[in-house]
Structure formats: structure tokens, C-alpha cells
Image: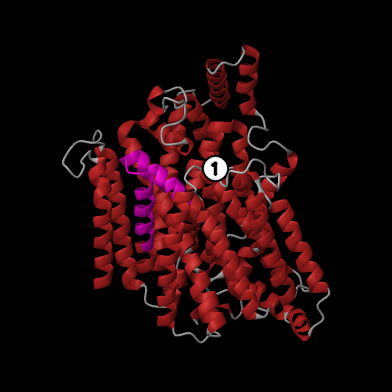
Amino acid sequence: MRSVWLALAATLLAALPVICRAAGIDASGGQRQPVNWAAISMFGLFVAVTLGITIWAARRTKTTSDFYTAGGQITGFQNGLAIAGDFMSAASFLGISAQIFSDGYDGLIYSIGFIVGWPIIMFLMAERLRNLGRFTFGDVASYRFAPTPMRSFAAFSTLAVVIFYLIAQMVGAGQLIRLLFGLPYEAAVVLVGGLMMVYVLFGGMSATTWVQITKAVLLLGGASFIAFMVMMRFNFSPEQLFSEAVAVKTRLAMAGGMSAADAQAAGTSIMGPGNFLKDPVSAFSFGMALMFGTAGLPHILMRFFTVPDAKAARSSVLWATTWIGYFYLLTFIIGFGAIVFVATNPAFIEADGTLVGGVNMAAIHLSQAVGGDIFLGFISAVAFATIIAVVAGLTLSGAAAISHELYAMVLKKGEADPVAELRISKITTLVIGAIAILLGIAFENQNVAFMVSLAFAIAASGNFPVLLLAILWKGCTSRGAVVGGFAGVVSALVLMILSPSIWVTVLGNQEAIFPYSSPALFSMTIAFVTIWLVSVTDWSPRGRQDRESYAEQRFRAETGIGASEAVAH
């Protein structure tokens, strides 16, 4: 416990410059900016509550099962809220609203894409995952396959998804803290990374779960209030809201020098597709990434092992889908509300016409426009909680990929000392945290929702095809799953780097080699075809064994008989 207290004290000391900066105090005692005590109080309250949760969880985290899955004792309702808290990330709250603020109707593709993946999880995967796995999705994928290559793929794919997802969260966190407290962006990212590492290092899944539950309740309440206040200004008529948003966009276009006809076209364009994704292939590929990537996110799949049985797993998905679906309806209102109340307010606009703090801060500015400084403080703290909760879940799944998949199951062949495994997991947490900080700084100007879509594309291209075919297709073999999984992940990464989003925007080249914004349509196809082709041509002894083991796997997946023993291990 002494080490826990020392770490928490160090974190609070690290946060002190933020609080001083927010209060307008610099090292020389001079005033730097007006005091926003509401924001300071809300931020401090959230940090205090979550650190308290971490202290409580640290006392309960004694085994690998406690660290990875909270001992499997989270209820279905609690886990549903935690999944919602894990899924409603900075990309959802800040990024989707920002995309709708910029491009209107097109931003809805995020909301639709994110939500339609949940029926796949509910009907095809949730119960089977819980019955077959113990800590990670690699446990499921390697149930009847050769464990060493399968778990090596699971670790590689998990880390690829986690890194891209973490970039988006760190960018959102840095921009939020910079806007709220006036800190340099780099210092804000370092602060968030430090807090996240404390939560995961000492509290494990218990702390992460309860931080996610707390954050989900606060975020749903805060977003509901923003949407209510926006709609109240328009007599709860969506038509009036959309009409005013079109009028605002038209006026802004005319102020920018457009002719009346062109300005009118620009204004009405926010109610139709084409502003964000210019061609059908990009739109289709992008939608596939969001839909199927949801069913392959390692930090979401890991949550199904925190509940006691398959029934609770199914209940988790039902509750999570309810909360997430409701939340995405709110983001649509928030995005259009920001067009009306933020884009027209000079207090939120820089001299060059850009949004103060960047476009990702549209929802934060809207909270101040409809609720004043006190609500700004509340919603900023909630957004910070959103980022911390998701980052903690991502880091935990990344740490599990190294400590459980590679160290315990591959290197030690399932005979690892639990104390050593926990130590490896905590070291990995520090490394992942450092990588997240560095990449968060490097990708400062990217839209956070788009960065998350890249993580979804990797999950859809690697994890999802392997899991789906491993669970549902008797003919899938170890060789096919591993080769096809790696083919999907590697092709997604390569095409992503060659796409306009990285090759042009980040690397500064003139023209992209791969013309589409999302690689999922192509990389998913490569994965499925490769898994099928390699499996049907694999008549090795291991391949025959994999096919013969399917009946036993299916029995376990659909009945759950034997699952309790695996969890108790």
C-alpha cells in the first residue's frame, strides 16, 4: 500500500501546476489568465474520486484474475455501463460532434457505424466469448488452434489497435486540458498519461471498471442536459434546429466571400452526404471499419470476461447497446447545436476564423454557451473522465497482450508465476503510457474521431475475421487464422500509411498512393480470403486436429459447461 500512496501523491504533485495555471498563477506569482474556479473544482473533484476508487481497488487486486478481469464478479448491468463508458470515448463525445459541426449530416456515419456493430456482438459473440475465454480474446482465438502462433498474432493485433486508439484519446485530452487550463499541449498530454498509468498500475480492472461506470453516468447526464438545452431553444423541434444550422452555414459562407447561390448550396450541403467522404468506396469502406471493428476491439472484448457467466455477458451487451444508442442520438443534436451557438459566437472563434482550441472542442464550447461557466467546468471534467476511462481500458488490454499472451502463454507455456506476470503487465503499462504520450504529441492536429476509425479498421481487418471464423467455421485451421489475421492487420496498416490521412496529412506528401480514407473494405477482404484459402489447402496433422476439435469447442461455446473452471484458474 505504501507504493500506492507514493504514486498517488506523485500524481497529485504532477497535477499541481495544472491547478495553479488554471487559477492564473505562474511560477513568479504573476496572473496568467482569469480564474475559472468551477472548472478547477470539477476537475479536482473527479481526480479525487477516481484516485479514491483506485486506492479501494488496489486493496482488492491481488491476483492476475483480479488485475485483468476484476475476478469475474462484475454484474451484467454494471458491465453494460462500463462497456458504454469504455466505448463512449473522446472520439464519440468530442470527435463526432466536431465532425457534425464541420460537415453536418455526414458525421452521422460515425454514430451509425459505431452502433450497428453491437447486434453482431450480442447475437454471435458475447456468450461464446464468455464461455471460451478467460482474460483476453486471444484465449478464445487459441482455444482449438496452435497456441503459440495464435497468441503471437493476438498480441500483435491488440497492440496495433490499442496504439491507434490511444493516439485519439491523448489528442483529445491534450486539447481539452490546454483549452481548460491554458497548459501547453505537450504538458497536458503528459499529465493525462501519468494519471492513466496510476489507475491501471494499482487498480487494474476493478479501478478501470468503476472509473468507466462513473464516467458513463456523468457523460450521459451531461450530454442529455446539453441536448435538452439546445432543443429547448427551438421548441423541441428538430426541423427548426436544422433550418437554423443551414441558415448559419449560409451566412458564414457569404461572409467568407461566396456568392449568394454558392453560399446557399454550401449551407444546404450539411443536410446531405458528401462533405466528409467524397466517394462511395470510401463511405462503404469507412462504414465497414466502424461496424465490424466494434466486434474486434480488444479492450471491449476483454470486458466480457469480467462477468460471472454467459447470461451476464448477454445482459451486458443489451445494457451497453441501450446506453450507447441513446448517447449517439445526443451527439447529433450536440453537433448541429454547435453550428448554431458556437460558430456564431465571437468568443469561441480565433482571429483566423478557426475554433478556439481546435474543432474537437465544439462540444465543450457548446456546454458553456448553454450552461455557463459552471456547466463548462462540469462537462470539461466529464470529457476528461471520458478520456481517462477509455485510456485506462486500452492500456490494460495492451498490457495483457504482452504479459498474458506473450509472456505467460507463449514464453512460459501457461506456467508463468502470477507475481512475475503481474510485474510484466505493470512494466508494459509504463511503456504503453510513454508511447501513447509521444504519439499523442505527434498527431496533435488530427480529428480524434477519424483517428479512432483507423483503430477500428485494424480491428475489423484482423481480430474480427479470426474470431468470427474461429467460432463459426469448422474448416478454419491454425495456419489459416494466423496467416489470414496477419495479412489483414499488415495490409490495413500499410494501406493506412499510404492513404491521404497519413501519407498526405501527417507525412506531408503531395498525393496519396492509396486513394481511399479507410482501408477496411480491402484489408478485410484480404483477411477473409486468406484465412479461407490457407485453411482449405491445409491438410497438415495440425489442420486435421483443428477441424476435429471444432465439435468440442462448439459444445463449450453454446453450453458454457467447463467455463467456470477456466475462469477460476
- Percent x, y of residue 345: 42, 23
Disc 1 is placed on an element classified as helix
Q: How is the image coloured?
A: secondary structure
Q: Magenta residues? A: 169-197
Residue shown at 63% from the left, 36% from the top? 276
Residue shown at 52% from the left, 53% from the top? 87
Q: Residues within 10 Å of mark 1 (few under 14, many from 20)?
A: many
Task: Please determine whether, in this image, residue 28 is positioned above or below residue 343.
Answer: below
- Percent x, y of residue 138: 59, 72
Query: In this rendering, does residue 308 appear at all?
Result: no
Between 64 and 176, the residue placed more toward the observer is 176
Is residue 195 highlighted in magenta? yes
- Percent x, y of residue 36: 26, 36
Q: Picture quarter containing residue 510?
A: top right
Residue identified by numbered label 1: 328
Q: Amino acid at mark 1?
A: Tyr
Task: Please determine whether, in this image, residue 175 is positioned above or below residue 556.
Answer: above
